[in-house]
Image: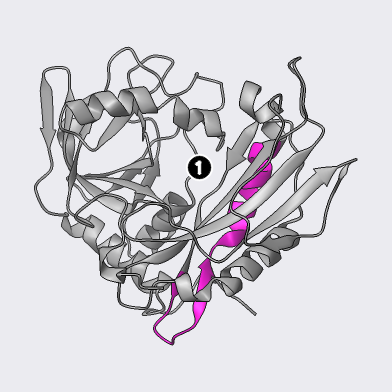
Amino acid sequence: MNIKWDELGFGYMPVRSNIRFHYENGKWSEAELTNDSTINISIAANCIHYGQALFEGGKAFTCADGKVRLFRPDENAKRLNHTAEYLQMPQIAEELYIDAVRRVVKDNLDYVPPYGTGGALYIRPVMFGTSPQIGVKASEVYELIIMVVPVGAYYKGGIKPVRAFIPENIDRAAPYGTGHIKAAGNYAASLYPSRIAKEKGCAVALFLDPKEHKYVDEFGTSNFIGITKDGVYVTPKSHSILASITNKSLMTLAEDLGIKVERRPIPYQELADLSEVGACGTAVVLTPVSEILYKDQVYKYGDEIGPVLKKLYTEMTSIQHGDKPDRHNWLFDLD
């Protein structure tokens, strides 16, 4: 194995193993580690035809003391179960889930980027219905697979600011639909506007609320954070956005640092009054935004990460990598 850790992007590569559960007759099987990176399902599998599928995203880090630790896997388990309930899929015990994550990370320890490289082992659980059926109904059989892959920065350039584009007349989710859960189809729905954004020279699409198109909702890949000129951390409150574990963590850290936090509707006109804007999520961590394009407007925030977002980014990554005390008990040991 010859991985150039400092050149890692955010892409797939084969690793040693993944771990799998099978659900049938109302119960989950024992977890099974396997080196098989393929799946064999019916051409009539529910997930293919009706999209009964969900996923999660977590990370494991090599800390300053050389130990590998998981970042908030309990929150991933809770969100996975919330999504499963909404999509009429079986839930899994939190302890069972965390134990499986520990096992697959331990079996792939040599794929965890070393301390100081800025990388992490990305943890991707995916659950999908596999009953062969033609009528629209919940599957009776499911697979839950937890795969891992070493990753670096989601966007090229690390924490260099990216440009964002607000598409007109395109919604990522319905006002009271599935935008608040991690349903696989939500991300398929963001691919077309993301392509438009890239054609405009932007890295990501930013969506307005689907009901009135008056308020900032979220990016195609992550939650929205704004820093006002008074230094207040603002983030949207909306039924159609995903509850980000990273955003939840950053809000806690902001309050630790004496930064006022407001979770509320943000009229898009307020984009003109923000001093800093960032996209946050497990994959992107905290990526600054240099400008946002909407209709004939260009909202500018600078070509470098701003002081407040930089402070939050440093605080977050310092805890994840063990450089600062884990005062909120977010890190889980593998043993």
Magenta residues? 61-84
Q: Residue at x 49, y 29 (%)?
A: 186
The residue that label 1 is drawn on is 243
> Is 79 one of the magenta-colored residues?
yes
The quarter of the picture where the C terminus appears is bottom right
Q: Residue at x 33, y 62 (%)?
A: 258
Residue 1: quarter of image = bottom left
Measured as percent of width and height from the top left, residue 256 is found at: 39, 65
Measured as percent of width and height from the top left, residue 35 is found at: 62, 62
Measured as percent of width and height from the top left, residue 3 is found at: 35, 70
Q: Residue furthest bottom?
A: 65
> Is 275 one of the magenta-colored residues?
no
> Is 265 on the left or on the right of 330, as rendered?
left
Q: Residue at x 58, y 61 (%)?
A: 73
Amino acid type for the residue under numbered disc 1? Ala
Answer whether residue 51 is visible to the viewer in this image: no
> Is 45 on the left or on the right of 79, as rendered?
right
Measured as percent of width and height from the top left, residue 151 is found at: 38, 60
**Structural crowding at the residue carrying mark 1, measured as other residues with C-alpha within 10 Å and reported as few (<14), some (14–19) or many (≥20):** some
